[in-house]
Amino acid sequence: METPPPNSHNDILIVEDSALYVSHFEKVFATTPYSVATITNGLAAWERLQTSQPKILLLDWNLPGLDGPTICRRLRAHQCERYVFVIMLTSMQRLEDVLTGFDAGADDYMVKPFESAVLKAKVRVGIRLWELEASNTSKVQLLARANLRQQDLIQTLEEKNRVISQQTQDIQNAQVQLVETARRAGMAEIATSVLHNVGNLLNTAMTSSTVIRETVGHSRVVSLTRLAEVLRNQPQGLLEFVRSDPRGAKVTEFISEIAAALGSEHQLVAGKLAVLAESHEQIRQIIALQQSYAGVTGVKDSVHLPGLIEDATRLFIESFKKHEIAIRCDFSPELPAILVEKHKLLQILINLLTNARDATKSRNREDRHIRITAACGTPDTVTMKLTDNGVGISPENQERIFNFGFTTKADGHGFGLHGCANLAREMGGTLKASSPGQGQGATFSLTLPIK
Ligand SMILES: Nc1ncnc2c1ncn2[C@@H]1O[C@H](COP(=O)(O)OP(=O)(O)OP(=O)(O)O)[C@@H](O)[C@H]1O
Ligand SMILES: [Mg+2]
């Protein structure tokens, strides 16, 4: 009897000890496409099944070594790689035998002698079921593998999520700190402008007073005093001195010369004193202005926009003069007073004016302009527009300039506009920017409710 090499998977394994039946089976399956192996001993059959499983096991009952039902029972208890379809083929034909066979795990039961056609039909059914089972198993395996991959993925995602949560938390903390810094920076903006301007004005005053001191220190008035002394000590009297003394002839000329010198000294000192007085007045106004804006948060005042805009631009007088920036204001005559927290509005204006100043610095000195207009928008709102002819804003940056921390300046923080937009919102208004493009200036429009 030919036995297939171990580990090869045959379609059908026949376990049958009767040589007659073995040759009969061989004839039956000779015309089918199935590969068939035969074993005549029960124990040998069981050993073969440990390493290689057929699709169909045709199992006799009475066998040397191990009987059919025992082989079947062990097979079902054994962890097989694939399902084995078992057909018991035996001469045991009592009902209890049939039931024992099924109980042992047989899938089908045939009694000898049998119809070859029926056996072939049953084998076909077995093969079909085996294939179904195999395809299910591979699907289950695929699913299991996919499941494993998914679990891996979930784990990786969870890990990433943890990292992102931590980073988000860090960013939130940093954001809170930055917002606080920005808020302080905004509050300090007015104070800084005030100090900056007072400092500039004090410089101007210092220069004037130095000039006055030097002029007075080197005044020709000393020569006049000396002449008066000489004249007082002339025993023959002033007339005689002028007539007879050689020095007397020059007195008139000398007096005219001193008078002219004293005249210019006087003019210089008077001019510088005027500058001093003006600086003093401006310092007084700026300090008064700062005091009037150091209001309590949350308190609204009735504000006339032209006056407030004038106050804001006053803080830039020195700076605009230095950079030769021309500022022009046009206000609608029907502009009503609005109810706002005026220090917030001043803060916005200072930021917008600072930005406009920075933007126009790129142009030639003789061509730097800022224009401010204010008019009623709708019956309930007023709109103030601040237009400069500076660097302008590229289309891609027009959305980003209000983002916290966005800046294109080497020394910028990117707090200004973000803070202004927030303040505008707090006041129930809006702040918008527009620009025809780079190098073509920009307009910032602040719309606020009248009440
Ligand atoms: N008038 C303007 N013309 C052109 N670009 C402007 C103008 N105003 C603002 N920008 C652009 O918007 C950016 C953000 O302005 P923002 O005032 O928020 O910050 P910053 O001026 O850069 O720094 P800071 O926090 O000191 O104000 C500026 O860096 C600039 O690129
Ligand atoms: Mg700014």
Image (cartoon, helix red, strand yellow):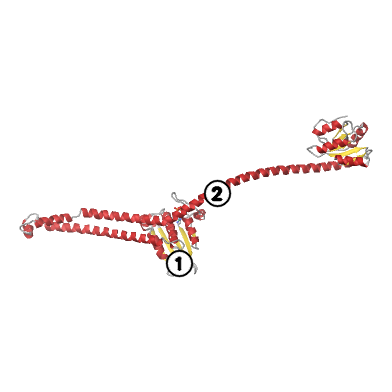
| Label 1 vs 2, first from the N-terminus | 2
Q: Is residue 63 visible?
A: yes
- Distance Cα–Cα, label 1 vs label 2: 41 Å
Q: Residues within 10 Å of mark 2 (few under 14, many from 20)?
A: few
Hey, what amino acid is under mark 1?
A: Ile
Relative placement, left or right, of 140 versus 198 is right
Q: Position of residue 422 (x, y in %)?
A: 49, 58
Q: Position of residue 147 (x, y in %)?
A: 70, 44
139 over 3 or under it: above or below: below
What kind of element bears circle 1? strand
Residue for badge 2: 169
- Depth check: 31 or 289 in front? 289
Disc 1 versus disc 2: nearer the observer: 2
The residue lying at 28 percent from left, 60 percent from top is: 274
**Ligand 1 near label 2 (Cβ, under 8 Å)?**
no
Relative placement, left or right, of 234 versus 335 is left
Residue for badge 1: 338
Task: For the N terminus, give its image quadrant.
Answer: top right
Q: Quadrant of residue 142?
A: top right
The residue lying at 24 percent from left, 58 percent from top is: 269
Q: Is residue 11 visible?
A: no
Q: Residues within 10 Å of mark 1 (few under 14, many from 20)?
A: many
446 over 415 or under it: above or below: below
Hey, what amino acid is under mark 2?
A: Gln
- Depth check: 143 or 242 in front? 143
- Depth check: 259 or 435 in front? 259
Q: Position of residue 193 (x, y in %)?
A: 39, 56
The residue lying at 13 percent from left, 54 percent from top is: 226
**Ligand 1 near label 1 (Cβ, under 8 Å)?**
no
Q: Quadrant of residue 121?
A: top right
